[in-house]
Amino acid sequence: MIIETILEVLKITIPSLIVLLTAYLVIRSFMKNESQKQEHQLRMETRKESLPIRLQAYERLALFMERISPYNMINRVRDPNMTAKDLQLALIKTIRTEYEHNLSQQIYVSAQTWNTVRLSKDEMIKLINLISASLPPDRSGKELSKAIFDYLMQMEETLPTQKALDVINAEAKKVL
């Protein structure tokens, strides 16, 4: 009789446990899917909100590279009364000021892109200093401008600002 009672209890308990386990697994799977959907939706909303900011960062960095390109910068900065030393200092100050103005953009672009921008800035300063050092200190700003343009015309490699622009544009296209 005890065995029959145990068997009766097992007949009721085992199917109940199976139903309970099945319900648990179904609910767990449903909750996991819902959680994944919410995470995905949150990521999409975040991306949607951050995309304009990131694109603006690429735009600002591209503008920075254009502004420190020697062709654009010399025409903007040069004054007819400047000496070569004055122009050198003005160009370097312009590059540093522009760079400092765009420092915050590094949080919106990849480390590689930011590093390229930083290196481009450093190379432009180095190039200006190198060409300035090759001229006597009493030369005019116009002569320094000519020396820079002559150097750029003879350069076989791409200008550092153009290399950085290429990297910025490539990354911006990936984001889109």
Image: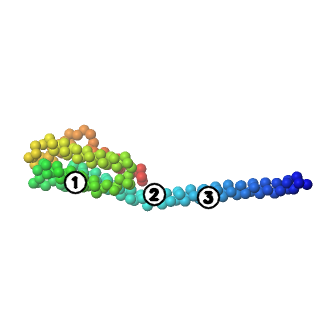
**Marks 1,3: beta carbons within 8 A:** no
Q: CA distance from mark 2 to mark 1?
A: 34 Å
Please tell me how crowded label 2 is: few (under 14), some (14-19), or many (20+) other residues with Cα within 10 Å.
some
Tell me the residue at 17%/43% (across/down): 131
Q: Position of residue 118 (x, y in %)?
A: 30, 48
Q: Earlier in the sequence, mark 2 or mark 1?
A: 2
Q: Nearer the viewer, mark 2 or mark 1?
A: 1
Residue at screen point 10% across, 45% down = 137
Q: Secondary structure at mark 1?
A: helix
Distance from disc 1 to disc 3, alpha carbons, whole Å, reads 57 Å
Residue where numbered disc 1 is placed: 94
Q: Is residue 1 visible?
A: yes
Residue position for label 3: 31
Mark 1 or 3 closer to N-term?
Answer: 3
Q: Residue furthest left?
A: 138
Q: Amino acid at mark 1?
A: Thr
What amino acid is found at the position of numbered circle 3 in the picture? Met
CA gap, disc 3 and disc 2: 24 Å
**Helix or strand or loop: what does disc 3 sit on?**
helix
Write down the residue under mark 2: 47
